[in-house]
Image (cartoon, rainbow, N blue to C red):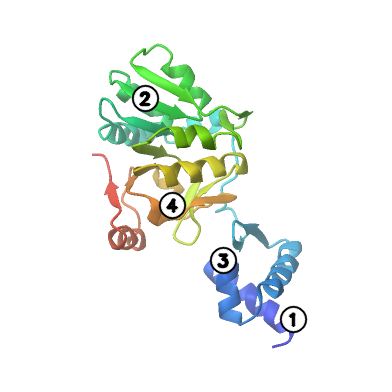
């Protein structure tokens, strides 16, 4: 297959699938990774596609951009409160948990403020809101402040995470999809999120209905790494099938 024909077929394939991994393209078109990288780079330079973690995606409005915490906080606020309330039922006195930065996870404060738990977090907002409640033992991951998300990110948190046995992690996401998994718009935080998911005994993903079939810049874990998915509305059948096949429990508050 000549180069131009191959690139045109790759272009059609990506548009049909919305996003694909480089490994998948290698297999489908029977070429080396270096060849695929060069072809993908040429398509990216044309402007219709963009690189995502481990692959390439259509450059459309489904890609979630990094927005300020304040802008995101007012969107679907009631739904986020319901999601947080449902998630809080899984938090028990004495638990060691991780609370991710996000406008849904911040709502957990209201529903755990009377519990006695140890909380590791990268969320500046969560730390500030937890100050009045002495029963909440808060440990910051520390690092450099990302002002867009009011969260900390650093390469120095690994030792801290390894020092604690995190029982439950309550994670946020810019968007999820079956192809790209659980994603995040800030590369500043992605390595931390990946480490937390790998370290925790149970992972809870808190997302509102707007997050399905969207994706951010970085994938921080595949969807099968999640144990509980808590959202405000029933997702499409393709997600229900995936969750059932991977023993992921779906929680939808009343």
What distance separates the C-alpha of mark 3 from that of mark 1? 20 Å
The residue labelled by disc 2 is: 118
Disc 4 + disc 1, Cβ < 8 Å: no
Q: Which of marks 4 and 3 precedes in the sequence? A: 3
Location of residue 42 (image quadrant) = bottom right
Label 2–label 4 contact, CB within 8 A: no
The quadrant of the rendering that contains the C terminus is top left
Give the mark, 4 or 1, whose residue is nearer the N terminus: 1
User: What residue is pinned by disc 3?
Assistant: 21
- The answer to whether the residue labelled 3 contacts the one labelled 1, judged by CB atoms less than 8 Å apart, is no
Vertical position of residue 96 compared to residue 29: above or below: above
In this rendering, the answer to whether 113 lies above or below 214 is above
How far apart are the alpha carbons under marks 4 and 1? Answer: 34 Å
Which SS class for mark 3?
strand
Look at the image and tell me whether residue 59 can be seen: no
40 to the left or right of 114: right
**Which residue is under mark 1?**
4
Image location (x, y in percent) of residue 147: 63, 28
The local secondary structure at tag 4 comes to loop
User: Viewed as shown, does residue 243 lie left or right of 39?
Assistant: left
| Lower sequence index among marks 3 and 1 | 1
Tag in front: 1 or 2? 2
Quarter of the image with the N terminus is: bottom right
Query: Tag 4: Cα neighbours inside 10 Å, few (<14), some, or many (≥20)?
Result: many
Q: Which mark is residue 212?
A: 4
């Amino acid at each position: 297959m000549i180069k131009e024909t191959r690139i045109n077929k790759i272009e059609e394939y990506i548009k049909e699938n919305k996003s694909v991994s480089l490994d998948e393209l290698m297999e489908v078109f029977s070429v080396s990774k270096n060849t695929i990288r060069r072809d993908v780079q040429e398509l990216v330079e044309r402007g219709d596609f963009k690189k995502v973690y481990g692959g390439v995606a259509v450059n459309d409005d489904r890609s979630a951009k990094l927005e300020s915490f304040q802008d995101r906080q007012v969107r679907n606020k009631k739904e986020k409160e319901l999601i947080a309330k449902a998630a809080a039922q899984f938090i028990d006195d004495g638990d060691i948990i991780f609370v991710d930065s996000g406008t849904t996870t911040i709502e957990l404060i209201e529903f755990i403020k009377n519990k006695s738990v140890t909380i590791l977090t990268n969320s500046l907002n969560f730390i500030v809101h937890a100050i009045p409640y002495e029963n909440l033992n808060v440990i910051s991951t520390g690092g450099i402040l990302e002002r867009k998300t009011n969260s900390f990110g650093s390469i120095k948190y690994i030792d801290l995470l390894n020092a604690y046995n995190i029982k439950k992690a309550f994670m946020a996401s810019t968007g999820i999809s079956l192809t790209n998994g659980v994603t995040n718009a800030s590369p500043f935080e992605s390595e931390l999120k990946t480490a937390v998911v790998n370290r925790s005994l149970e992972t809870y993903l808190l997302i509102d209905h707007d997050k399905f079939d969207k994706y951010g810049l970085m994938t921080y874990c595949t969807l099968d790494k999640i144990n509980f998915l808590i959202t405000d509305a029933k997702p499409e059948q393709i997600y229900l099938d995936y969750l059932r096949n991977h023993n992921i429990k779906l929680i939808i508050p009343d």
